Amino acid sequence: MSRVPEIEVFFADICPLCHKAMDYLKSRGLAFTAREVFWSEPDDKFVDSKNSRDMYAKCGSTVDFVPQIFVNGHHISGWKKMEPMIESGEFDRLLKSRRV
């Protein structure tokens, strides 16, 4: 019996790499929770919200870019990290991994 992977993506609507990551997940038929965060140009940080606080807590620190992707609790910090993981097969291994 295979487990359904738990996938969560913190994204900003204006971020093309966020959409690339989510489009990839959709193309694979993978269900995921998308949690939007908003960037404040004047403050040069994400707007304080439940989603941004949750993102910081899950990342273990303040981050200044998205997407922040979690697969079965494993953190992938951005599309530029995720893309080579897809190519190497590491992403598929995470999909089958146990939740951390």
Image (spheres, rainbow, N blue to C red):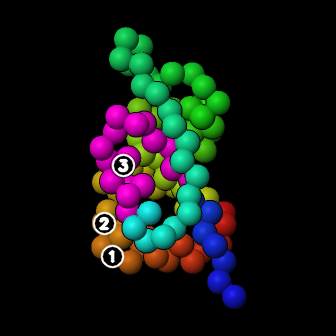
Marks 2/1: CA–CA distance: 6 Å
Residue sitting at the far top: 42
Q: Which mark is residue 47?
A: none
Quick check: 33 above or below 15? Answer: below
**Along the viewing direction, whichever of 3 and 81 lies nearer the viewer:** 3
Q: Dividing the picture into quarters, in which one does residue 51 lie? A: top right
Question: Which of labels 3 and 1 is toward the front?
Answer: 3
Q: Is residue 79 visible?
A: no
Marks 3/1: CA–CA distance: 21 Å
Q: Dividing the picture into quarters, in which one does residue 89 lie? A: bottom left
Q: Which residues are magenta?
A: 8-25
Query: Would residue 8 be found to the left or right of residue 3 on screen?
Result: left
Query: Would residue 6 be found to the left or right of residue 93 on screen?
Result: right
Q: Which mark is residue 88?
A: 1
- x, y (%) of residue 36? 51, 37
Badge 3 element: helix
- x, y (%) of residue 41? 36, 17
- Work out whether mark 3 precedes mark 2 in sequence or the reverse, and give the earlier one: 3
The amino acid type found where label 2 is placed reads: Pro
Quick check: 1 above or below 36? Answer: below
- Which residue corresponds to mark 3? 19
Badge 1 element: helix
Placement of the C terminus among the 4 image quadrants? bottom right
- Which residue corresponds to mark 2? 84
Placement of the N terminus among the 4 image quadrants? bottom right
Q: What residue is at 33 percent from the left and 53 percent from the top?
A: 20
Marks 3/2: CA–CA distance: 17 Å
